Amino acid sequence: MKLLRLFLGVIVPPLGVFLTVGFSTTLLINILLTFLGWFPGSIHAIWVIMKYQENMDEVV
């Protein structure tokens, strides 16, 4: 599932973020960054997905 989210985070950044954190301010920030350009949105999406996974690994 992580690979799918990362792939979608690169191709369609808001979708990857939505699948990771759901509807939140993080998603709105990513949508704004994606409107400013595909590259900033993708970088933010990858960061959010990796940070979420890191936090989930700490909990377990």
Image (tube, rainbow, N blue to C red):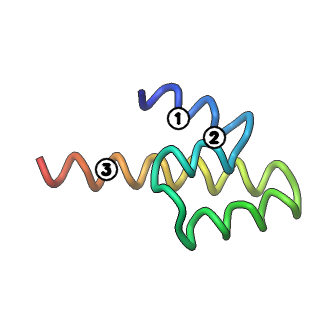
User: Residue at image x 49%, y 56%?
Assistant: 22
Q: Position of residue 36 (x, y in %)?
A: 88, 64
Point out which mark residue 9 bears.
2
Spatial distance from mark 1 to mark 2, Cα to Cα?
6 Å
Q: Residues within 10 Å of mark 3 (few under 14, many from 20)?
A: few
Q: Quadrant of residue 37?
A: bottom right
Q: Secondary structure at mark 3?
A: helix
The reply, left or right, for residue 37 in relation to residue 17 is right
In this rendering, is residue 1 above or below 49? Answer: above
Q: Quadrant of the N terminus?
A: top left
Task: Tell me the residue that label 1 is attached to.
Answer: 5
Q: Residues within 10 Å of mark 2 (few under 14, many from 20)?
A: many
Task: Tell me the residue that label 3 is attached to.
Answer: 54
> Of the residues shown, which amino acid type is indicated by label 2?
Gly
- Determine whether label 1 and label 2 are within 8 Å by CB: yes
The reply, left or right, for residue 40 in relation to residue 36 is left
